[in-house]
Amino acid sequence: MIPRYSRPEMAAIWAPETRFRIWFEIEAHAMDAQAALGVVPAEAARAVWEKGKFEIARIEAIEAEVKHDVIAFLTNLAEHVGPAARFVHQGMTSSDVLDTCFNLQLVRAGDLLLGDLDRLLTVLRRRAFEFKDTVCIGRSHGIHAEPTTFGLKLAQAFAEFQRNRARLAAARAEIATCAVSGAVGTFANIDPAVEAHVAKALGLAVEPISTQVVPRDRHAMFFATLAVVASSIERLATEVRHLQRTEVGEAEEYFAAGQKGSSAMPHKRNPILAENLTGLARYVRGLALPALENVALWHERDISHSSVERMIGPDATVTLDFALVRLAGLIDRLLVYPEAMRRNLDRLGGLIHSQRVMLALTQAGMAREAAYSAVQRHAMATWQEGGSFLDRLAGDSEVTRHLDRAQLAAEFDLAYHLKHVATIFGRVFGPGAAVAASAA
């Protein structure tokens, strides 16, 4: 985590103060459950809540000596609780505290990320309807293909991030487990009722079976989901980058008064936010692989996963949080240029209607191969020499035997490509969405 790409709300989840506070709550709730079972005195449980404190600097000083973070925390806690502290951590092992805490932090981080996605979806929906019927060229392989609308581009992004939200909600639910099962997960020295009590108190589910550690396939799915979300961020950012290219010029990041694009060239207006998002997405994706490799631990437990998670937990969630908020802002203020879109549509002299002409010729009785050959011949000539595709077709007697100029011209109508836009919007946003958007 670095401040440049961190938002305070997410960074706070990973602060030492938050981590140790969760550790304290796990231990204190466990003491309550132990007292209810008669394992520890009720006054000891009360003493933990009433006197329990910790100091980060003191914990770090103790850890420097004992080389164990949980023991350092418990030692510092005991300095405040007094004699009753001998009952703290009864029957528990370090992973009970560490794993339950880590899962709770991921849950809280997941909640923030879900909120980020909701805000992004709101922006994408609004702007998709704004440009629902704004015609632009669709590209395949980077080459002009057939007309689409800018609204459809944004609707596709909305649908993708809606799927991402569902994936993240499922990953958040899957990671929301608590394990307080003692050494090797057998509950030999602690009653399962303690785990159930702690889980309920923290808003988590009981881990059905742990091996001293929570199974890491849960974490692998969580971080893999973050990686998929990051990939979707990059896909949309890449689209913006391409559309902002000088030769395209169909959309552009907002450029504020006084903003500078280049230290050398005063004229530059660069897609810096989209490029930044591309880099952040690559970083988040890179953090998924270590999480996948953490699944295979030795026997009931080792700590090969621990060092990895101390880094990827905060780094992945903080970075993705920042990226989602930045993307929402980028799309919210994105400058869109319909006139440039229209110029690009006309750039190839009507070649974008080649499929319609070919299909019309086949409907009029021409063999498909012959139709393809005739249309392609005039398309290539138009591409290389310029001029009007329609004029070339209308001057070919082989073509006009089947379609006259007026019939050919009818196949060049852009409105033809918009006839199912409302249907697609209905699929993405719901059947009544178009009407509701119009009323708004």
Image: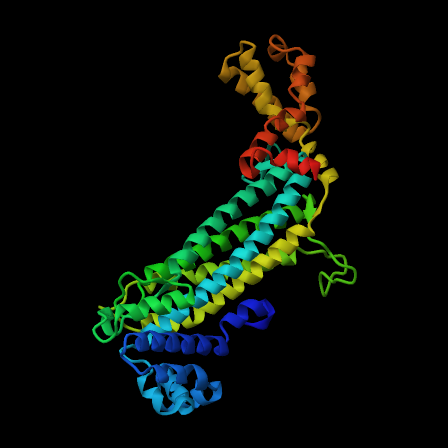
Residue 160 vs residue 249: left or right? left
Q: Is residue 83 above or below residue 242?
A: below
Say which residue appears at 48% left-offset and 69% top-offset. 314
Say which residue appears at 71% left-offset and 60% top-offset. 261
Say which residue appears at 41% left-offset and 56% top-offset. 173
Q: Position of residue 155 (x, y in %)?
A: 58, 41
Q: Is residue 375 above or below residue 222?
A: above
Q: Is residue 53 above or below residue 103?
A: below
Q: Nearer the viewer, residue 116 or 417?
A: 116
Residue 401 vs residue 189: left or right? right
Which picture quadrant has residue 406?
A: top right
Q: Is residue 374 visible?
A: no
Q: Nearer the viewer, residue 56 or 391?
A: 56
- Outermost residue to the right: 257
Q: Position of residue 308 (x, y in %)?
A: 39, 70
Q: Position of residue 201 (x, y in %)?
A: 41, 68
Q: Quadrant of the C terminus?
A: top right
Q: Nearer the viewer, residue 120 or 38?
A: 38
Q: Is residue 99 visible?
A: yes
Q: Position of residue 210 (x, y in %)?
A: 27, 65
Residue 389 vs residue 198: left or right? right
